[in-house]
Image (cartoon, rainbow, N blue to C red):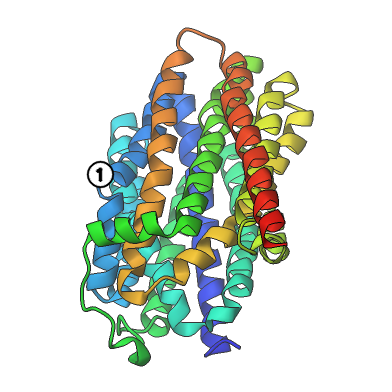
Amino acid sequence: MTKDKNKVRLLIASDSFSKLGDMAEGIALATFVFTITQSGFLFGLFLFLRFVPELIIGPFSGYLADKVSRRTITVSVNFSLAITSILLLISHENYIFILIIATIASFIKMLFRPAFLSSIPLIVEEKELPNINRWFGFFGGFARVIGATIAAYGIFLNNIALIFSLNAVSFLVFGIVCWFVIPNKKRLINQDHEEESSTLIEALKFMWHSKKIFGLVMGSTLLWGCLALSDTLLVPTLGTAKDGGEEFYGIYRILSAVGMMIGSYFSYKWYKLFFDKGKHLVGFFIPIIIMCISTLLIPLSPFFWGYILYLLIWISKDLPANLLDVELQSVPNHIRGKIISLADAIDGILFSLITLVLPILTEFYDPGLILILAPIPFLLLTIWLLINSIFQQYNKNSKSN
């Protein structure tokens, strides 16, 4: 049972509200940037610079989460993000200004996840983590549906100032809740015997020697790499398929939020199905295969079947999330933030490279064609890894019998 149900519920509600505002702002900015530039390269640069912070400070953000009060970090991050939304509200007509503010916001966001995710085990019993993570994801997905709807409405009315205002308020509310809910102490009383500090090298060694965590991180890297394909190429594909087609991006983002909500809800059952040793990688590879097939089929019917395929992509994206998150949250408290940030940084390397390279290719080739071909290497590699994992598990079971 959770240590304080009301605190957890309040945290889930405020986290979801912040995701609502962030989703709305993200869609509005992406659509607005492509509309004012009409360039796949400049749009890709916008996406890439938002992920550059993950490459630069991503691995080190966890060090801060293990060294400084996690409550202080989460509150400061939310208040700072509220300020960036206010700045966009004041001036959002200039591409360079948007680029600078979006990049700064990305740097700030890098500090949040290790501190926040590391704090959850301090207010939730370990055995309840899969279920609580499920509800964070489910209500976060529901909030994103509303946020995407608001974004589509704001874009249609050409009133994205309303969206920036909403996002600023949502981050302020979340910051206030974090102050009252997240414990100020970095460690539980019964963990005081743990080391007072640890290095990134020690965190890397821990991850390397933990085959389960390392395998899940590699699976997560493939998953995010596949997701980057549609994230990077969808807007240019829609824009070239139909005049003004990028305006349908809002509908796609609504479907992505619905998919996350569905995937998060079933992630608990998915976790129970695959958490046994040896099966966890299978639980990651199956969704990646679905994502690859769905991604390469989108350009064939972007304004009909593409909607269903995109929904499948995002359901598959969140299905295996618990398999990795619970393992990350279960590592020793004094090193937890570093492990989480390292896992995120490894994911981000491939994701960032894809968001940098593919937009350059769209200057020479049709985005839809690239979106058809790009998932094939991911598909073939994942099928091979899945078969290999199944055979390894079969051999282990045979030896044990």
Picture residue at 61% right of the left edge, 14% below the top: 369
Image position of 111 (left or right of 181): left
**Percent x, y of residue 83:** 31, 58
Image position of 23 (left or right of 207): right
Picture residue at 56% right of the left edge, 35% below the top: 226
**Percent x, y of residue 114:** 37, 63
Picture residue at 67% right of the left edge, 37% below the top: 289
View extreme (top): residue? 364
The residue identified by callout 1 is: 56
Residue 312 in sight from this viewpoint = yes
Q: State the count of labels.
A: 1
- Picture quarter containing residue 370? top right
Picture residue at 49% right of the left edge, 62% below the top: 18
Q: Amino acid at mark 1?
A: Ile
Check the image and report above or below for 160 versus 133: above
Q: Could you say which is closer to the camera, residue 91 or residue 245?
A: 245
- Position of the C terminus, as image quadrant, is bottom right
Q: Could you say which is closer to the camera, residue 360 or residue 326?
A: 326
- Picture quarter containing residue 288? top right
